[in-house]
Image (spheres, rainbow, N blue to C red):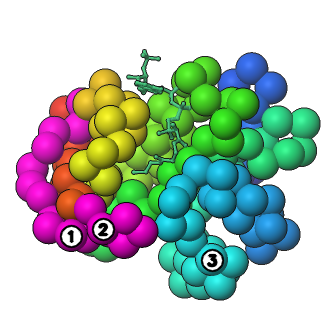
Protein backbone atom coordinates (compact mmCIF):
# COMPACT_ATOMS: atom_id res chain seq x y z
CA UNK A 1 0.00 0.00 0.00
CA UNK A 2 2.70 2.47 0.98
CA UNK A 3 4.57 1.82 -2.23
CA UNK A 4 1.46 2.48 -4.36
CA UNK A 5 0.83 5.76 -2.54
CA UNK A 6 4.43 6.80 -3.16
CA UNK A 7 4.11 6.00 -6.86
CA UNK A 8 0.97 8.15 -7.05
CA UNK A 9 3.02 11.13 -5.90
CA UNK A 10 5.77 12.62 -8.01
CA UNK A 11 7.88 15.52 -6.88
CA UNK A 12 9.78 17.65 -9.41
CA UNK A 13 11.53 20.85 -8.27
CA UNK A 14 8.96 21.54 -5.56
CA UNK A 15 6.02 20.42 -7.68
CA UNK A 16 3.94 17.56 -6.32
CA UNK A 17 1.63 15.61 -8.64
CA UNK A 18 -1.13 13.81 -6.77
CA UNK A 19 -4.76 12.72 -7.21
CA UNK A 20 -7.32 15.52 -7.57
CA UNK A 21 -9.97 15.67 -4.84
CA UNK A 22 -13.24 17.59 -4.52
CA UNK A 23 -11.53 20.24 -2.37
CA UNK A 24 -9.32 21.07 -5.38
CA UNK A 25 -12.22 21.84 -7.71
CA UNK A 26 -12.52 25.61 -7.00
CA UNK A 27 -8.82 26.13 -7.70
CA UNK A 28 -8.94 23.87 -10.75
CA UNK A 29 -11.93 25.79 -12.18
CA UNK A 30 -10.00 29.07 -11.74
CA UNK A 31 -7.06 27.66 -13.74
CA UNK A 32 -9.48 26.22 -16.32
CA UNK A 33 -11.13 29.62 -16.89
CA UNK A 34 -7.76 31.23 -17.50
CA UNK A 35 -6.77 28.43 -19.90
CA UNK A 36 -9.78 27.85 -22.18
CA UNK A 37 -12.31 29.88 -24.20
CA UNK A 38 -14.99 27.26 -23.42
CA UNK A 39 -14.05 26.07 -19.92
CA UNK A 40 -15.42 23.05 -18.10
CA UNK A 41 -17.88 23.91 -15.33
CA UNK A 42 -17.49 23.02 -11.66
CA UNK A 43 -20.14 20.31 -12.15
CA UNK A 44 -18.17 18.73 -14.98
CA UNK A 45 -15.06 18.47 -12.80
CA UNK A 46 -17.02 17.03 -9.86
CA UNK A 47 -18.68 14.48 -12.14
CA UNK A 48 -15.38 13.50 -13.75
CA UNK A 49 -13.55 12.90 -10.47
CA UNK A 50 -16.58 11.02 -9.07
CA UNK A 51 -17.02 8.67 -12.02
CA UNK A 52 -13.56 8.48 -13.60
CA UNK A 53 -11.11 9.01 -10.77
CA UNK A 54 -7.94 9.33 -12.84
CA UNK A 55 -7.41 13.05 -12.36
CA UNK A 56 -4.27 14.62 -10.98
CA UNK A 57 -3.24 18.08 -9.84
CA UNK A 58 0.20 19.59 -9.80
CA UNK A 59 0.75 21.67 -6.67
CA UNK A 60 3.42 24.12 -5.64
CA UNK A 61 3.44 24.95 -1.94
CA UNK A 62 -0.09 23.58 -1.72
CA UNK A 63 -1.50 25.66 -4.60
CA UNK A 64 -2.93 24.06 -7.74
CA UNK A 65 -0.77 25.08 -10.72
CA UNK A 66 -1.95 22.50 -13.27
CA UNK A 67 -3.96 19.33 -13.76
CA UNK A 68 -4.59 16.37 -16.03
CA UNK A 69 -7.70 14.21 -16.32
CA UNK A 70 -7.74 10.88 -18.12
CA UNK A 71 -10.09 7.93 -18.54
CA UNK A 72 -9.15 4.33 -19.18
CA UNK A 73 -11.47 1.97 -21.06
CA UNK A 74 -9.90 -1.46 -21.53
CA UNK A 75 -6.55 -0.88 -23.27
CA UNK A 76 -7.18 2.75 -24.23
CA UNK A 77 -6.46 5.89 -22.23
CA UNK A 78 -8.27 9.11 -23.27
CA UNK A 79 -6.85 12.46 -22.25
CA UNK A 80 -9.93 14.46 -21.21
CA UNK A 81 -8.39 17.68 -19.94
CA UNK A 82 -4.98 19.22 -19.36
CA UNK A 83 -3.91 22.69 -18.32
CA UNK A 84 -1.03 24.48 -16.69
CA UNK A 85 -1.64 27.90 -15.11
CA UNK A 86 -0.11 30.84 -16.98
CA UNK A 87 2.89 31.65 -14.73
CA UNK A 88 3.91 27.98 -14.69
CA UNK A 89 3.98 27.34 -18.42
CA UNK A 90 7.09 26.46 -20.43
CA UNK A 91 8.74 24.81 -17.42
CA UNK A 92 8.09 21.18 -18.37
CA UNK A 93 4.98 20.78 -16.25
CA UNK A 94 2.61 19.85 -19.10
CA UNK A 95 5.07 17.19 -20.15
CA UNK A 96 5.41 15.92 -16.57
CA UNK A 97 1.62 15.68 -16.12
CA UNK A 98 1.27 13.61 -19.31
CA UNK A 99 4.13 11.28 -18.33
CA UNK A 100 2.57 10.88 -14.91
CA UNK A 101 -0.78 9.82 -16.40
CA UNK A 102 0.86 7.52 -18.95
CA UNK A 103 2.94 5.93 -16.18
CA UNK A 104 -0.21 5.10 -14.24
CA UNK A 105 -1.91 3.83 -17.40
CA UNK A 106 0.97 1.55 -18.23
CA UNK A 107 0.68 -0.10 -14.84
CA UNK A 108 -2.92 -1.00 -15.74
CA UNK A 109 -1.90 -2.30 -19.19
CA UNK A 110 -2.97 0.47 -21.58
CA UNK A 111 -1.76 0.09 -25.16
CA UNK A 112 -2.52 3.56 -26.48
CA UNK A 113 -3.37 7.11 -25.48
CA UNK A 114 -5.81 9.17 -27.53
CA UNK A 115 -6.80 12.84 -27.35
CA UNK A 116 -8.48 15.67 -29.23
CA UNK A 117 -7.00 19.12 -29.61
CA UNK A 118 -8.25 22.30 -31.27
CA UNK A 119 -6.75 22.73 -34.72
CA UNK A 120 -5.61 26.23 -33.70
CA UNK A 121 -3.92 25.05 -30.48
CA UNK A 122 -0.43 24.77 -31.89
CA UNK A 123 1.13 24.99 -28.42
CA UNK A 124 -0.57 21.81 -27.23
CA UNK A 125 0.04 20.09 -30.56
CA UNK A 126 3.76 20.84 -30.20
CA UNK A 127 3.70 19.29 -26.74
CA UNK A 128 1.99 16.12 -27.99
CA UNK A 129 4.32 15.81 -30.99
CA UNK A 130 7.35 16.26 -28.73
CA UNK A 131 6.13 13.30 -26.65
CA UNK A 132 5.71 11.12 -29.75
CA UNK A 133 1.98 11.47 -30.40
CA UNK A 134 0.94 11.25 -34.04
CA UNK A 135 -2.00 12.88 -35.79
CA UNK A 136 -4.45 10.13 -36.77
CA UNK A 137 -7.63 12.00 -37.69
CA UNK A 138 -9.89 15.03 -37.54
CA UNK A 139 -13.39 15.66 -36.15
CA UNK A 140 -15.21 18.43 -38.03
CA UNK A 141 -16.70 21.24 -35.88
CA UNK A 142 -16.01 19.28 -32.69
CA UNK A 143 -15.54 22.36 -30.49
CA UNK A 144 -17.79 25.33 -29.62
CA UNK A 145 -16.89 28.90 -28.62
CA UNK A 146 -15.46 29.18 -31.20
CA UNK A 147 -16.62 26.39 -33.49
CA UNK A 148 -13.53 24.56 -34.61
CA UNK A 149 -12.27 21.20 -35.84
CA UNK A 150 -10.47 18.80 -33.51
CA UNK A 151 -7.34 16.96 -34.48
CA UNK A 152 -7.07 13.46 -33.04
CA UNK A 153 -3.65 12.45 -31.73
CA UNK A 154 -2.61 8.97 -30.64
CA UNK A 155 0.35 7.41 -28.89
CA UNK A 156 1.02 3.68 -28.85
CA UNK A 157 2.51 3.02 -25.43
CA UNK A 158 4.61 0.09 -26.66
CA UNK A 159 6.77 2.78 -28.26
CA UNK A 160 7.52 4.07 -24.74
CA UNK A 161 8.98 0.81 -23.42
C1 LIG B 1 -0.55 23.07 -23.51
C2 LIG B 1 0.00 23.31 -22.10
C3 LIG B 1 -0.65 22.31 -21.14
C4 LIG B 1 1.52 23.07 -22.11
O1 LIG B 1 1.98 23.13 -20.77
P1 LIG B 1 3.48 23.59 -20.43
O2 LIG B 1 3.73 23.19 -19.02
O3 LIG B 1 3.66 25.02 -20.76
O4 LIG B 1 4.31 22.70 -21.44
P2 LIG B 1 5.83 22.22 -21.27
O5 LIG B 1 6.62 23.28 -20.59
O6 LIG B 1 5.82 20.85 -20.67
O7 LIG B 1 6.30 22.17 -22.79
C5 LIG B 1 6.58 20.96 -23.45
C6 LIG B 1 6.64 21.22 -24.95
O8 LIG B 1 5.40 21.76 -25.41
C7 LIG B 1 5.64 22.69 -26.48
N1 LIG B 1 5.26 24.03 -26.04
C8 LIG B 1 4.91 24.42 -24.78
N2 LIG B 1 4.62 25.74 -24.78
C9 LIG B 1 4.78 26.19 -26.05
C10 LIG B 1 4.61 27.45 -26.67
N3 LIG B 1 4.21 28.55 -25.97
N4 LIG B 1 4.84 27.54 -28.00
C11 LIG B 1 5.23 26.48 -28.72
N5 LIG B 1 5.42 25.23 -28.18
C12 LIG B 1 5.19 25.09 -26.86
C13 LIG B 1 7.14 22.63 -26.74
O9 LIG B 1 7.37 21.59 -27.67
C14 LIG B 1 7.67 22.23 -25.37
O10 LIG B 1 8.93 21.64 -25.43
P3 LIG B 1 10.26 22.55 -25.30
O11 LIG B 1 10.13 23.28 -23.99
O12 LIG B 1 11.37 21.56 -25.32
O13 LIG B 1 10.23 23.50 -26.46
C15 LIG B 1 -0.26 24.78 -21.63
O14 LIG B 1 0.23 25.67 -22.62
C16 LIG B 1 -1.71 25.08 -21.36
O15 LIG B 1 -2.21 24.85 -20.26
N6 LIG B 1 -2.42 25.61 -22.38
C17 LIG B 1 -3.85 25.96 -22.24
C18 LIG B 1 -4.72 24.72 -22.08
C19 LIG B 1 -4.51 23.74 -23.23
O16 LIG B 1 -4.34 24.12 -24.39
N7 LIG B 1 -4.57 22.44 -22.88
C20 LIG B 1 -4.46 21.36 -23.86
C21 LIG B 1 -5.79 21.09 -24.45
S1 LIG B 1 -5.73 19.80 -25.69
Query: Picture quarter containing residue 124?
Result: top left
Left or right of 99 on screen, residue 116: left
- The answer to whether residue 90 is seen in the rendering is yes
Please give the range of residues in magenta: 132-148
Tell me which corner region of the image, top left, top right, bottom left or bottom right, holds residue 143.
Answer: bottom left
Q: Rounded to the nearest whole Å, what is the CA distance between mark 2 and mark 1?
A: 6 Å
Q: Would you say the residues marked 2 and 1 are in contact, meaning their CB atoms lie under 8 Å apart? A: yes
Reply above or below: 64 against 80.
above
Mark 2 / mark 1, whichever is N-terminal:
1
Local secondary structure at mark 2: loop
Q: Is residue 158 magenta?
A: no
- What residue does disc 1 label? 141
Question: What element does badge 1 sit on?
Answer: strand
Badge 3 is on which residue? 41
Where is residue 115? Give x, y as percent. 30, 56
The front one of 53 and 79 is 79
Residue hosting label 2: 147
| Gap in angstroms between the C-alphas marked 3 and 2 | 18 Å
- Secondary structure under tag 3 reads loop
Q: CA distance from mark 3 to mark 1?
A: 21 Å
Residue 159 location in percent, x, y? 19, 33
* Image point (78%, 48%), residue name: 64
Q: Between label 3 and label 1, give the one nearer the viewer.
A: 1
Left or right relative to 48: residue 12: right
Label of residue 61 in the image: none
Q: Main secondary structure of the magenta part?
A: strand
Amino acid sequence: MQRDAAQEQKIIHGIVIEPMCKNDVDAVVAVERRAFSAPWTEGMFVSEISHHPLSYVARYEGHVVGYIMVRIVFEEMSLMNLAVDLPWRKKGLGEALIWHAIGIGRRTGIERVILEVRISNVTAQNLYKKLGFQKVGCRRNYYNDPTEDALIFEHGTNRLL
